[in-house]
Image (spheres, rainbow, N blue to C red):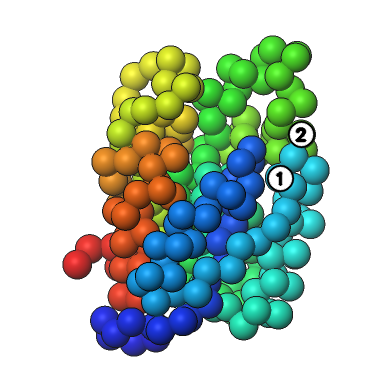
């Protein structure tokens, strides 16, 4: 892709987060299709699939679908970042939205309750400690800064999206980054998030 032209049915793989799976990305997929991107939803169980297995399954899907672009939401962004780190030649551009690179304060507090630990499964370590993937080429990071969500009471101080603090999504080595007035769910439900993804995948930058 070059310039500002629409990629016209260019395939892009969407990687969901922890609890809501692919249905959480249906509206985003529809919005991206209207913008000319053919969304392919990646299927995996984040509570049961360890990160290396999820990463390699994503790599196989990228090859089989012919996609050169990938988008990860929330914990799915960790899978995308790990994929990009191990397979730098297998993609052209990648975007992550609301991804806990530095771990999640809300997750740490919830995990203290033994009755809730089963909700996290094998994803618990990365949600608690985060992932520092180092330099990742051609990666854009989207952060929400509209505090709406059930976990807001667990996020004292600083900008947040209702689930993650803005500082928890920071990745210094990102190619570009943008903060949007969206909640954690709004990142994949609103038009603003879809447009940000389109801008980066098509133009290589978030700004117009």
SS of the residue under disc 1: loop
CB under 8 Å between discs 1 and 2: yes
Visible residue check, residue 127: yes
Q: Residue 15: which quarter of the image?
A: bottom right
Residue extending furthest toward the left? 208
Seen in the image, is 21 located left or right of residue 203?
A: right
Q: Which residue is mark 2?
A: 121
Q: Residue at x 52, y 24 (%)?
A: 105
- State whether residue 92 is above or below residue 136: below
Residue in front for this viewpoint, 153 or 82: 153
Q: Residue at x 62, y 18 (%)?
A: 110
Earlier along the polypeptide chain: callout 1 or callout 2? 1
- State whether residue 95 is above or below residue 187: below
How many other residues sit within 10 Å of disc 2, few (<14), some (14-19) or many (≥20)?
A: some
Q: Which residue is mark 1?
A: 46
Residue in front for this viewpoint, 23 or 79: 23
Q: Residue 170: which quarter of the image?
A: top left
Residue 91 lies, in percent from the top left, at 55, 75
How many other residues sit within 10 Å of disc 1, few (<14), some (14-19) or many (≥20)?
A: many
Q: CA distance from mark 1 to mark 2?
A: 8 Å
Residue 108 lies, in percent from the top left, at 60, 22
Seen in the image, is 187 located left or right of residue 50?
A: left
């Amino acid at each position: 892709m070059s310039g500002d032209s629409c990629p016209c049915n260019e395939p892009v793989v969407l990687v969901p987060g922890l609890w809501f799976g692919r249905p959480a990305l249906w509206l985003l997929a529809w919005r991206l299709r209207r913008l000319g991107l053919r969304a392919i939803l990646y299927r995996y169980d984040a509570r049961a699939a360890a990160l290396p297995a999820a990463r390699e399954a994503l790599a196989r899907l990228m090859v089989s679908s012919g996609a050169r672009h990938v988008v990860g939401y929330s914990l799915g962004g960790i899978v995308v970042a790990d994929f990009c780190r191990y397979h730098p030649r297998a993609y052209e551009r990648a975007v992550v939205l609301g991804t806990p690179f530095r771990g999640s304060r809300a997750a740490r507090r919830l995990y203290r309750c033994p009755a809730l630990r089963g909700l996290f499964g094998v994803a618990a370590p990365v949600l608690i400690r985060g992932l520092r993937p180092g330099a990742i080429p051609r990666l854009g990071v989207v952060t929400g800064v509209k505090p709406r969500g059930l976990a807001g009471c667990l996020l004292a101080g600083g900008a947040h999206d209702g689930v993650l603090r803005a500082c928890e999504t920071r990745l210094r080595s990102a190619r570009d980054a943008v903060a949007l007035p969206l909640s954690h769910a709004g990142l994949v439900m609103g038009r603003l998030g879809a447009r940000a993804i389109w801008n980066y995948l098509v133009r290589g930058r978030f700004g117009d």
